[in-house]
Amino acid sequence: MTQGGPISVAGLVDRLTRPPGRDGRLTHLEVLPPRFGRRAAWPTWTSADLVRALAGRGIETPWTHQAVAAEAAHSGSHVVVSTGTASGKSLAYLLPALTSIANARGPHGQRGSTVLYLSPTKALAQDQLNSLLALELPDLRAGTHDGDSSREERKWARDHGEYLLTNPDMLHHSMLPGHARWSKFFSTLDYVVVDECHHYRGVFGAHVAQILRRLRRVCALYGASPTFVLASATVAEPETAASRLTGLRVAAVTEDGSPRGQVALALWEPPFTSYHGENGAPVRRSATAEISELLADLVIENVRTLAFIRSRRGTETVSLTTKRLLDEVAPGLSDRVAAYRGGYLPEERREIEQALRRGDLLGLAATNALELGIDIAGLDAVLMAGFPGTRAALWQQVGRAGRGGQDALGVFVARDDPLDTYLVTHPEALIGQPLEANVFDPANPYVLGPHLCAAAEESPLTEQDLEMFGPTARAGVDALTEAGLLRRRPSGWFWTDRHRASDLADIRSSGGSPVRLVEQDTGRLLGTVDQSSSHGTAHPGAVYLHQGETYLVDSLDLDDNVAIIRRAAPDYSTSAREITEISIVSETVHVSWGHARISFGDVSVTHQVVSFLKRRMPTGEVLGEEPLDLPERTLSTKAVWWTLPAIALEEAELKARDLPGAAHAAEHASIGLLPLFATCDRWDIGGVSTAQHLDTGQLTVFVYDGHPGGAGFSERGFHAAAEWLGATREAIASCRCEEGCPSCVQSPKCGNGNNPLDKAAAIELLDVLLTHRPLPQPAQ
Ligand SMILES: [Zn+2]
Ligand SMILES: [Zn+2]
């Protein structure tokens, strides 16, 4: 193959499957046809300077989706543009926003129109600023506003900034509480851009939804009513998520007008190894070991490849292993492979990006964390170590490949867990399915309460205001008044405490004071972890991953909420195990499938982390289990649960002694599969199973949201129960192990040592459960 020539997808797949022993690893190959680009004219109102500047960057005309979305925003409609990776979504908001700024500028260059750009991370805002400045628009005053900004920069932004790039955290903690100082900026605010809005999901999504409502309210105080333009990865029903996020009616633009070559997606399952895991279960070869070989093969073929790996250490292992493999067969090529991670300076990142674009670098191992703010074009292939969480994210990663509209190959390599195993053996669950909707619940009372207080501090809340905060706001305000946090006066509800109300909500965590992670040697605060998950992730002895770096936790002080950690490179990973009890507080809704009953409602969960398991990396071999002494915790949250009465089990001739293992195995697998339906991580949810539960008197399996007040995940599970539990049954049945393994019914966080588990009885039990389920609607 010549340098930089187009790739042949069929030839590459043949090359990857040919080496001896690789039989059966490719479980499916899906080839999507190319799409031709559709161009539009510049909207007639576009500023002439902007058209010139874009032409200078090689953009002669917009693609149709860019023009349609820009036109909608210009006419004052709130709009979300939800198209593929690298389809140029930013033009959709840059055209109206920059034109508005240019047109409103006074004769002496005075500011007349302002734009607020929000991104989930500082790094992305910085990248966006760099591309904005590269346009070299005359007089444009743009800048970032984040925790690193100096006092002078902040003052400049308030007094002169036209296009301000920030994040929801700054809005929440600084700009909204201090809105009086920003009054001029807010009073002329014409556009609010919410970039990468699919990142606002779960509890974080609920917080951001409330912050955007507070923003709208503050703008209204100053007579402004900005148009919202949101950019999203391709997800299902982007208009629903965008409307939930902003509280406004938002139209969606989803028809991608940008060109794309042929895209092939290969599904790949690593084989079982000779190692044995817990209870003698077989262990699969790790996805990273598999990817190192595939990466070496692709580099030899001169194919520019990016491998997405979970951890920084993983990227380094892949990079080193690939180099070693190359040295054996193709000396000289190993210099053209590198690891790429967070923490690099922008210049270092640019250098790597350019080396890849030039073809000097052929193979790159990067952490998923780099998904945001990464600007890598010119790739031929993408390797993925494990499912990136959603179908939308998977296609987004695959979308990184395909330079200049050429053909592209994506390879999804399964990790040893039920979801990955299910997906590579059930391609129909990945391909041709509508993408996931973005799940979050703005009405979560644990989230809403603090934001109502913050809003009241910003300006007393009136009856009218409450509508904006949703149907549960009135009850929330009453409870806060009752608790003495708000005071009712004739003109509204007031915040009268001397503390800052915005400190009540930590928007990146969910309830309770977060636990601070402090580096032992330097005393540096590296980050925080939710109190609710700290026992499971920051217990003494835990291997903790932070932005791709590996740390060991030395101690966890629960009185001061501090975990002391230090950089380390252990050759094992850890997973905490917890035991859980659950009681039903109230059932909100249920459906019946024959004898079976599927319910959703409020529960109280008592759980305790009791030990942790060490596994050798990358083989997954179990090294041992260490006990922990941590207190019980209780959690009020939401759950989905299903019950089967004794009569149904007897009719199906299920033996009583098999039921605990059957329910337990079904619970584990269903937790593993829920992320496919609810855009959550398996660590966001938990489960309990019992052959007879105190509250129901029947065999019951619960899956609950691991966040106080719930995060919308179990609710989604309830609504998708037929598909979700059906997929759970399939995942167990199609795993090729004999008696259960981490790819089907074993769970890394099981507090009962994955015992008892009964794979065969779990399938029978789920068959009974599913007998009378409503049949899924055939696809239109
Ligand atoms: Zn298995
Ligand atoms: Zn378990």
Image (cartoon, rainbow, N blue to C red):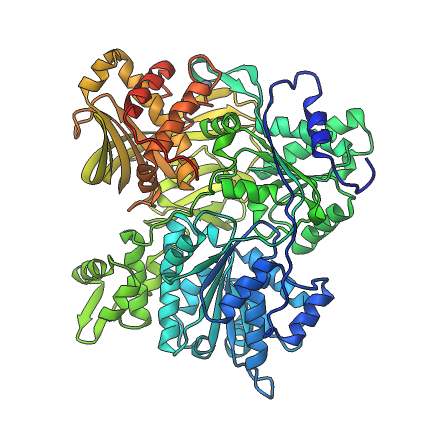
Q: Which residue occupies the extreme front position in the image?
A: 780
Would residue 232 be found to the left or right of residue 247 on screen?
right
In the rendered image, residue 157, in percent from the top left (x then y), is placed at 53, 73
The answer to which quarter of the image holds residue 22 is: top right
In the rendered image, residue 200, in percent from the top left (x then y), is placed at 44, 52
Q: Is residue 453 visible?
A: no
How many numbered marks does the figure carry?
0
Q: Residue at x 22, y 40 (%)?
A: 589
Classify the position of the C terminus by image quarter: top left
Q: Is residue 505 visible?
A: yes
Would residue 439 be found to the left or right of residue 55 on screen?
left
Q: Residue at x 39, y 58 (%)?
A: 243
Classify the position of the N terminus by image quarter: top right
Would residue 455 be found to the left or right of residue 101 on screen?
left
The answer to which quarter of the image holds residue 61 is: bottom right
Q: Nearer the viewer, residue 645 or 297?
A: 645
In the rendered image, residue 315, in percent from the top left (x then y), is placed at 62, 37
Would residue 228 be found to the left or right of residue 300 on screen?
left
In the rendered image, residue 8, in percent from the top left (x then y), is placed at 73, 35
Q: Is residue 382 above or below residue 93?
A: above
- Ligand 1's image quarter is top left
Q: Which residue occupies the extreme bottom position in the image?
A: 107
Q: Residue at x 30, y 69 (%)?
A: 457
Q: Is residue 317 above or below residue 191?
A: above
Q: Nearer the viewer, residue 212 or 467?
A: 467
Q: Is residue 659 above or below residue 528?
A: above
